[in-house]
Amino acid sequence: MARKPKCRRVGHIPRADYFKPAGIPAVDLEEVILKIEEAEALRLKDLLGLEQVECAQLMGISRTTFQRILVDARQKVADAIINGKALMVQGGDYHFDRDLVD
């Protein structure tokens, strides 16, 4: 039996949750779903430039789990950009913590 995923702490919910290539109707696009905690991993590491250990501590997870989430997030964003897919930010296993780094 698989273990239930640990709830991740996030400090930011993206205001926009759907991104698509210009000029292509949404009905004609494949969608890639980026989980909220994956977006948070990108924010902490790539936007704020924090070290992985610090990012993991802020999210309440291990460094290896953070690294896996970050790799998955980067792969999904690259897939959407390179292959012209829509990117939807939604879902995941997280709880919002407004006291996390801004």
Image (tube, rainbow, N blue to C red):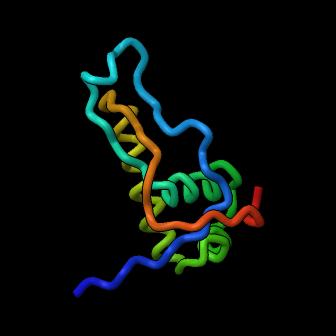
Q: Quadrant of residue 15?
A: top right
Residue placed most toward the observer, 93 or 21: 93
Q: Position of residue 74 (x, y in %)?
A: 44, 50
| 89 lies above or below 73 | above
Image: 92 above or below 59:
above
Residue drawn where x is 46% and y is 31% of the image = 19
Q: Residue 81's image quarter?
A: top left
Q: Is 100 placed left or right of 87 in the picture?
A: right
Q: Picture coordinates of residue 14 (x, y %)?
A: 60, 45
Tally of marks? 0
| Front residue of 60 and 62 | 60
Please tell me which residue is depicted at 46% across the width and 74% down the height of the picture. 65
Q: Position of residue 67 (x, y in %)?
A: 48, 68
Q: What residue occupies the far top of the structure in this picture?
A: 23
Name the quarter where the N terminus is drawn. Answer: bottom left
Residue for point 33% across, 31% down: 85
Quadrant containing the C terminus is bottom right
In the displayed structure, does residue 11 sit left or right of residue 27? right
Residue at 66% in and 48% down: 47
Q: Position of residue 33 (x, y in %)?
A: 37, 47
Q: Using the image as rendered, state which of residue 75 and residue 5 is in the foreground.
A: 5
